[in-house]
Image (cartoon, helix red, strand yellow):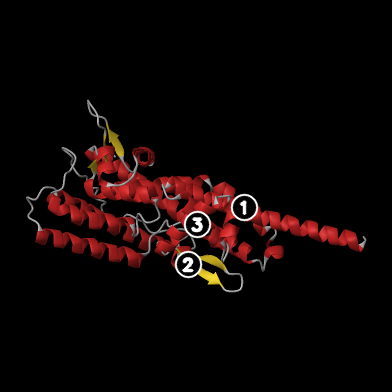
Amino acid sequence: MTKTDQISKSNSHENDVSTLLFSSQQQIVEFIQDISNYRSQNSKESQIKAYLIFNPVLTQDQFKKLTKISCGTISETLKELTKKKEINVELNKSTKKYEYSLNSSYSKTSLAFAQGEDSLTKEIIFFQKKRSEILQKFEPSTSGCSFLIDRLDQLIHTYEFLLNFSAWTNECLKYSDKRFPPLITKEIILVQSKFDKQIDLDPSLLQVESNLINHLTNHQILRHHSEITAEILAYFYLRGKITQQKIKELTSFSNGRISQTFKELENFHYIRKIIPRKRPYHYVMPSILEANIHLLCESTEKLLSWQERLAEIQRNLENRAEIFLNNPTFNKMSHFLNGIFQFIPIYKKAHKELSEKINTLHEKKGLLM
């Protein structure tokens, strides 16, 4: 073989390796986006964060090549993620270009299936404090006061469930034999608000609600959603029953965007439509906890639908492991896939327990969601 042939063969081999790495990364990013989209999260933000899982730093030009998103959209998305403190930005003095990296707190829970226990505990304390403040400041007879307290109780109960779920998930990771302990060790109580009409808060409570909405959209459960989805969900958390017209009055969003978001939330079983004899349609979220359990179960089903495809990606990478050994992108993808396959049996067990429990509760009480 001539030297030219050897160089040509070497270049071809390197191209094959590079193509496999790039293709595998694209497929894993597609998986992350699919999960995120199914959970009604911001698609562009999910895509950018996904690429940062496997690449230590990226510039806007590199994002453009990877994502095919317009420069303007990339710039705005990066600004939003920086504002949320989900990514870091630093100016490279030699290249004069800004470089973006993933915040370490996000990379540990790249799919955000399980929430951090410390932050969940802080949220519980926050809402308990707000509940006490409302009871001290307002009479129970104040329009909407009792209902708002009821919704805060539901929210606290939901955070307590998520805290328990997070602790249980971390405990299950210690079991190499997959004989996981039961998730449900005490009765799940699905408190459901009763709606005679759309809730109208007393003007004195509107500022309290506004502060709670602002907190919800920027913390824990809702912060990975798009701006409009997070705000509308926050209003459902606090009001339970609402019309599209009322959201229009409360927010600055257009009718078209509101209508589209309501359709998405209905498809994802966050809310359901009540069709009266005459319009307007009302939409309800009777139980905050049940809405989140539905999300968990259906996200797990979406995860399981990718299991075979992810296994194939993992096999293809492992077959070239010797070649990729010192490649940081390969190492990050392998670590990510290993983590996913650790979580799959845990979430399958959680899905089974929760689905059975929800179905049993519905059969006993005739609950609707």
The residue beneath circle 2 is 88
User: Quarter of the image containing the N terminus?
Assistant: bottom right
Q: Secondary structure at mark 1?
A: helix
Label 3 – label 1 distance at C-alpha = 31 Å
Q: First in sequence: mark 3 or mark 2? A: 3
| Neighbours of disc 2 within 10 Å: few (<14), some (14-19), many (20+) | some
Taking depth in this image into account, of 331 and 104 the one nearest to the observer is: 104
Against 343, is 293 above or below? Answer: above
Q: Secondary structure at mark 2?
A: strand
The residue beneath circle 1 is 313
Q: Residue 94 at what x, y percent from top left? A: 61, 73
The residue beneath circle 3 is 75
Q: Secondary structure at mark 3?
A: helix
| Neighbours of disc 1 within 10 Å: few (<14), some (14-19), many (20+) | many
> Residue drawn 40% across and 50% down?
226
Going by the numbered disc 2, the residue's amino acid type is Asn
Query: In the image, 231: left or right of 317?
Result: left
Q: Quadrant of residue 365?
A: top left
> Residue drawn 21% across and 51% down?
151
Label 1 – label 2 distance at C-alpha = 29 Å
User: Quarter of the image containing the C terminus?
Assistant: top left
Q: Residue 205 at what x, y percent from top left? A: 15, 53
Query: In the image, 329: left or right of 228?
Result: right
Asked if the residue at tag 1 contacts the one at tag 3, i.e. Cβ–Cβ closer than 8 Å, the answer is no
Q: First in sequence: mark 1 or mark 2? A: 2
Q: Quadrant of residue 326?
A: bottom right
Q: Residue 95 at what x, y percent from top left? A: 61, 70
Mark nearer the viewer, 3 or 1: 3
Going by the numbered disc 1, the residue's amino acid type is Ile
In this view, which residue lies farthest toward the bottom?
93
Residue 191 in sight here: no
